[in-house]
Image (cartoon, grey):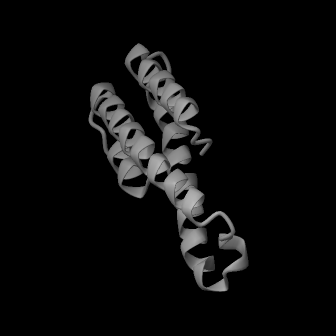
Amino acid sequence: NVEAADKINSAKNEQEAADAILKYSKETVKLTEKAKAIEAKYADFRIAANKDLEAEAAAVQESFTKFHDSLTRLTSRFPKSTVIMDALRKHAQESYRSGNRQ
């Protein structure tokens, strides 16, 4: 998420930003599939109940926040960009299909 946010923030044009969104989306789908497999294997495991993982969970949440903030800034930079809107639509569709709600 942090890497994707950085690429979006530093994009020189709308196509570069759209490419970063789509790359992030593909990577997220793969990670979601892995997470589902881990959840199935360790159904009783809860991150919230494991104090050793609090810092990691907070870092993950912070990375999602940074990514979503970068998308907000991006839509302000390119408010009428069909390229950006198409990439965001594809990202939303992939996220929904994969079961990732972040």
Question: Is 84 above or below relative to 32?
Answer: above
- Looking at the image, which residue sits at the far front? 41
Q: Is residue 98 left or right of residue 4?
A: right
Viewer-closest of 53 and 73:
53
Q: Quarter of the image containing the C terminus? A: top right
- Residue 69 in the image: state x and y as whole percent: 55, 46
Residue drawn at 63 percent across, 78 percent down: 54
- Looking at the image, which residue sits at the far right? 49
- Residue 79 in the image: state x and y as whole percent: 50, 22
> Where on the picture, by quarter, is residue 10?
top left
Question: Is 95 above or below relative to 67?
Answer: above
Residue drawn at 37 percent across, 18 percent down: 83
- Residue 64 in the image: state x and y as whole percent: 55, 53
> Where on the picture, by quarter, is residue 101?
top right
Question: Is 43 above or below relative to 95?
Answer: below
Question: Is 50 above or below relative to 102?
Answer: below
